[in-house]
Image (cartoon, rainbow, N blue to C red):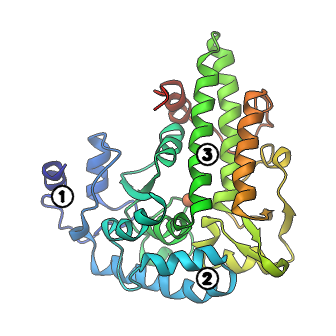
Amino acid sequence: MAQTDMKLGAGLQDGSGLTTTEAAFIEEARDAHQLYIEQPYRLYSADNNETWRQLFSRMLPEWEKYANKHFLKGIEQLCLDPNSVPRLEDVNKFLAPLTGFHAKAVSGYVPGYLFFDCLRQRAFPTTITIRHANKLDYLPEPDIFHDIAGHVPMHTDPAFADTLVRFGEAARTAAEIVSEIKDHDTKVQRLDSIIRAMARFFWFTIEFGLMRESGNELKVYGSGLLSSHGEIEHSLMSPDVQRYPIQLEWVINQYFEIDHYQELLFIVDSFDHLFSLVGELETWMKEGKLNNVSGGEPVVNKADLDSFLEANFGRQ
Ligand SMILES: [Fe+2]
């Protein structure tokens, strides 16, 4: 990998550093069909580090007010540098001994099955680019701030980490179930529905979940909220947001849109509660209850479908 890394990084001194949609290193990796990559740390520019510093410093007071206690502990345990983009290697030194999880650099979108299967193996596909300094507030695609500051602190918690692994196991079960279906059109229709149900469940929990803590207080554990300066407060304080105890039958049939603040959020009691819900999701999958969930967002793309259809799911 080191040699390839050198080749890909050679001569890329154009000043854009590793900025979202502007990084030649990433384009070259994608062209070479390299999904899993190294983090070429030398390519980060002074602007990239300044963007990280601004994002981190303005989130700190928000986290102290609104983040769940496991996240706050995780931020401390990871010893993230507030002033510069983290090296994944350093993050993993602190993370791996706690839960076995590690951040794994990727060049872009990871198709559904591959993503979940990484989780099953306690690896978290991690974007290494960082948003442009003039887009601090909203970015449709993930960046290293969302992935490392929003997701990875949660991975220091054993119950949360086990829940992610459980998602990976459920994805494997989905691949096994559809592999038994002979008729191609039926296979694709069922898979489309199961993936949509899983994506919705993931969205309303891991990305946008709320948790009831001691004293009945609501806190944020979803990473989309934990990495959003504007939405974290809005999610807990705005009267415009509906907040309901999570119900599996609702979540799997509820469409979502990614380009505005969420007006509907779901609450879990604990990560043990969330873990048991993923188990229930898998049971429902086996019983056929995910075969015809309601239409609408998210659209399941061909890469996601193919990743499940081509899955190598021999039990390991
Ligand atoms: Fe995310």
Residue 10 horizontal/vertical position (percent): 13, 58
Beta carbon of the mark 2 residue lies under 8 A of ligand 1: no
Compute the Cα span from label 3 to label 2: 26 Å
Q: Let me know if residue 187 appears in the view.
A: yes
Circle 1 residue = 9
- Between 135 and 46, the residue placed more toward the observer is 46
Circle 2 residue = 63
Are dots 1 and 3 in contact, CB under 8 Å? no
Q: Nearer the viewer, mark 1 or mark 3?
A: 3
Relative height, residue 160 to residue 82 (above, below)? above
Kind of residue at badge 1 = Gly
Q: Earlier in the sequence, mark 1 or mark 2?
A: 1
Residue 218 horizontal/vertical position (percent): 78, 76
Q: Earlier in the sequence, mark 3 or mark 2?
A: 2
Residue 30 horizontal/vertical position (percent): 32, 45
Residue at 61%, 46% in the rendered image: 166
User: Quadrant location of ligand 1?
Assistant: bottom right
